Image: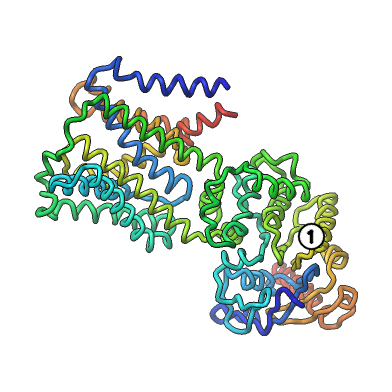
Amino acid sequence: MSVLELSGVSKRFGGLQALSEISLSVKPGEVLGLIGPNGAGKSTLVSCITGVLRIDGGTIRFADSDIQRLPPHRRARRGIARTFQKVRLADQLTVYENVAAGLASRWFAHAGGWSLVFRRLSSASVARAVNRTLERVGLIDVSGLSVKSLPFGRRHFVEIARAIVSEPKLLLLDEPATGLTESERERLARLVKDIAAGGCAQILIEHDLELVGRLCHRVTVINQGHHVFTGTPAEAQTDPEVVRAYLGMNQLIGGGADDAHR
Amino acid sequence: MSRRVLLFVAIGALAALPLTVGTFWINMVITALIFSLAVFSINLLTGFTGLLSFGQAGFVGIGAYTLGVLAKQGTPPLLAGLCGVVLAMLCGFLLGLPAARLKGHYLAIGTLGFGILIYQLLTNSVGLTRGPMGLIGIPTGGIDKQTWYLAMLAICLTMLAVLVYIDRFSTLGVILKMVRHDEIAAQASGINIFAVKLIAFTVSAGFAGLSGALFAAYVRFLTPDLFSEQESFRYMMMAVVGGIGSPLGGFAASLILTMIPEGLRALGEDNYRLLVYGTMVLFVLWFLPSGIGGLIERQRK
């Protein structure tokens, strides 16, 4: 049984058909790779799932209910968490405070959530969840430091911690490996497997195909807003459509460079 | 530990102030304390939540005139003051409905427009407010300055403590600051940014309304000029000098910036003192871009 199910999702920006009839599904504990060349519509798809963008056609079902009319914060409260391609954290606040903010989706998931907001930031229930998550992502030693004092790679992990502290049902990772060192990349891989083992469904957008091949149970390839392929990573490497999508991209880059020389 | 001692010494010194200085200065400090509540309203709205408002004097005016008009018609002052705060909050809520959708310059201009609207309303509703002739003789006399001073000190320190708690220790502080830093990320964390902004507008208006009601009760004489947009700018300046997100800095700034112009009267009655005053403010912002609050923060670390 899938936790997230998209069928025939379309999105148009004026004259540009950004997504046409995309269908995909993710099961609890599954890691779905979402790949495609730049401008394929991956980030648009994430925005449609999280509710930042409204879709023009199709349906989005999450945990057995239609969510396409819900605003982003309500989808987050239902259990959809995400990280961002360009890290979005409150730089002046501490790591602990940033991660605690992620708990909001759990507090407000119940009626009367507002009564919880006067609790101390260091109260037992908050501290337990935050510290456990910080330990899980390997940031417990920098809990009290401000985010801006952290190296770039570790900020990615703060974002992941903020996303998983509320124990979401679905986690969307938008290019989490960008700018990570080799050891951080390994830590990320372990973390993704650990999150999957906990039963959380994940969609991983990533350009690092080695990482995608290693972590994802299935991959979905999209190109120019169209669904190209869904299957195992091994199948993807030999699929002619996928090869063409990526080859096309290479040719495009080559052509652009030639234009520049002329 | 030593910080706690310092805190008690500071509160003790403030409480003992009436014993050492004359009526003129006590008067000044009471007014400054009343202003500090309006500065707190900016700390909450702009400092914590990131919503720029140049219309706070409008809410102060609503609080003040509600108390003034009702008390003159025989309503008990305490009840009239409560009505002032509630009416200010209602207006804050109503302003918030459109304003919470605005950002940056648009929000600043929208709130400025609200402030001017209230000012014009107070000026032109002559039947109710007596307009530019002023509302005279608000029946809230009979309390001596010592009592006023101690009561104001108690109110302001309580509010200050509440705001510092929210800012540094509560989960609410983190929610507000997430909205200020990054609305997209806040939404993705399940925060309803529209609701948060609406509540921030409402509560902030309540602080400003309380400031106005207390002003009316203390001074007992109101004119619309006391609530013009110039006053909004003055509150904003106090908040900025204090460090926009620091209620403690805002408290200090409202005391200092109310008293310096009076102290500078020693330079003579002409407008040179305003020149000196303006230069001082510029220097503070030049050398302390995050205000007095930034200085306190640096000492803390």
What's the amino acid at mark 1? Ile
Q: Along the line of sight, which residue is nearer the eye, B3 or A250?
A: B3
Using the image, determine if residue A189 lies above or below residue A132. Answer: below
Tell me how many marks there are.
Answer: 1
Using the image, determine if residue B12 lies above or below residue B86. Answer: above
Query: Is B115 displayed left or right of A147 in the figure?
Result: left
- Kindly indicate the quadrant of the structure image that contains residue B256: top left
Please name the residue shown 57% across and 67% down the image.
A74
Q: Along the line of sight, which residue is nearer the eye, A133 or A153?
A: A133
Q: Along the line of sight, which residue is nearer the eye, B45 or A40?
A: B45
Quarter in which the N terminus of chain A is drawn: bottom right
Chain that bears disc 1? A
Q: Which residue is mark 1?
A: A195
Using the image, determine if residue B245 lies above or below residue A239. Answer: above
* Residue A27, image x, y percentages: 77, 73
Please name the residue shown 67% across and 38% down the image.
A144
Quarter in which the C terminus of chain A is drawn: bottom right
* Residue B211, image x, y percentages: 30, 41
State whether residue B282 appears in this view.
no
Secondary element under disc 1, as helix, strand or loop, is: helix
Query: Is A63 displayed left or right of A68 in the figure?
Result: right
Q: Along the line of sight, which residue is nearer the eye, B245 or A207?
A: B245
* Residue B139, image x, y percentages: 14, 39
Please name the residue shown 71% across and 57% down the image.
A164
State whether residue A68 appears in this view.
yes
- Kindly indicate the quadrant of the structure image that contains residue B212: top left
